[in-house]
Amino acid sequence: MTAETRFETLDTHTGGEPTRLITDGLDRSEFEGGSVREQRDAFAETHDRVRELLMKEPRGHDDMFGAVRVPPEAEEADVGLFFMDGGGYLDMCGHGTIGVVTALVQRGELEPKSQIRVETPAGVVTAKPTVEDGRVERVAVRNVRSFVVDETTVTVDADGGELTVDVDVVYAGNFFAMVDGEAVEPPVDADHAGELVDLGLGIRAAVDDAVDAVNPLTGESGEVSITEFYRSDRDADRTLVVFGEGSVDRSPCGTGTCAKMTLLHREGELAVGERYAHESVVGSRFTGRLLDAETRDGLTVTTPEVSGRAYVTGEHSFVSRPDDSLG
Ligand code: PYC
């Protein structure tokens, strides 16, 4: 008989966006040790097949998102977390941090401290859970320092022609291509998600070619990994976020909310401490605020905080057999 491999997961959704925390079945000796960024890179080298197995069909789907808990290296951190999707890995994730902290605190696997420090590949973020009767009602995540990196104009293929569009490049744990919904043809809503995915992937690739995605605070270089289309509305800004191999974030995107607040601050439209509401294509909301901001050498740097609610959706036991050619 051929031996099967078994993987256990603990799944949540945050504003509709899934996070599949892989809790068992990994050979941790192959990637644990060092910073969370190093552990994520070692996982990518040794366990990428597991990412594909649990993110993609038939065990996952085009919009699945995942995380792995690892020991942190940073002295001040309580826990380490890295993130993945159907296409690869992201440095930071707001909805994922909210989901994992909610699940682990509710299950007693993480001490319900007022401030839980989470080391991510992007750096240490702070998660502040609000707990009532053992249930985590909300988690506020203080993100890494964020800033507007650059602005550029790119020309991409768009539905039967070409589109030239102005893009702001913002770092908020991930590098974002920020696109004003007024500048594109399809309206920024769920009905046009398919068109916006194609456009978003094209814009992301063009912006990544056009700019140096370097974090001036750490010197680390990365890649433009997410396109965020935004539009203003009466009581909240709307957003549609495209990432991975064409995933659409069902949540308003935690790091994307931080990127938008940072951009608004640079444009003089959001003050430090002012409450911000961000709504996703499915109508779920995150709230946020900037905890501080300063301009140094022409660079506006902020510390954003984003807050949302998550629910545990299930615990899963997945199996995989080596003689299953489709995997
Ligand atoms: O919540 O930061 C986020 C996120 C990134 C990609 C999908 N969600």
Image: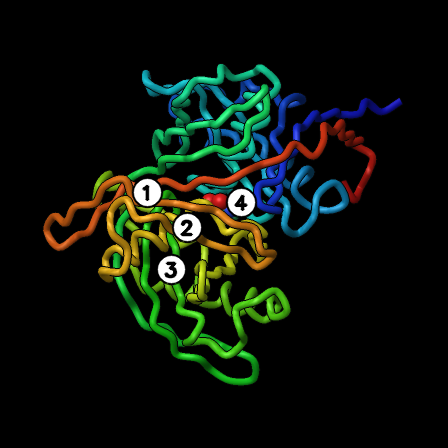
Image position of 310 (left or right of 35): right
Does label 2 or label 1 sit earlier along the sequence?
2
Name the side, left or right, on which 215 lies relative to 201. Answer: left
Cα distance between the residues tagged 3 and 1: 24 Å
> What residue is drawn where x is 30% and y is 48%?
274
Q: Which dot, 2 or 3, sits closer to the camera? A: 2
The Cα–Cα distance between marks 2 and 3, rounded to whole angstroms, is 20 Å
Q: Earlier in the sequence, mark 4 or mark 1?
A: 4
Camera-nearest label, 4 or 1: 1
Q: Secondary structure at mark 2?
A: helix
The residue labelled by disc 1 is 304
Residue 88's tag is 4
129 versus 178 height, above or below: above
Q: What number is the disc on residue 257?
A: 2
Q: CA distance from mark 4 to mark 1?
A: 25 Å
- Could you say whether the residue bearing mark 1 is in a helix, strand or loop? strand
- For mark 2, does the 10 Å Cα neighbourhood hold few (<14), some (14 to 19), or many (20 or more) residues? many
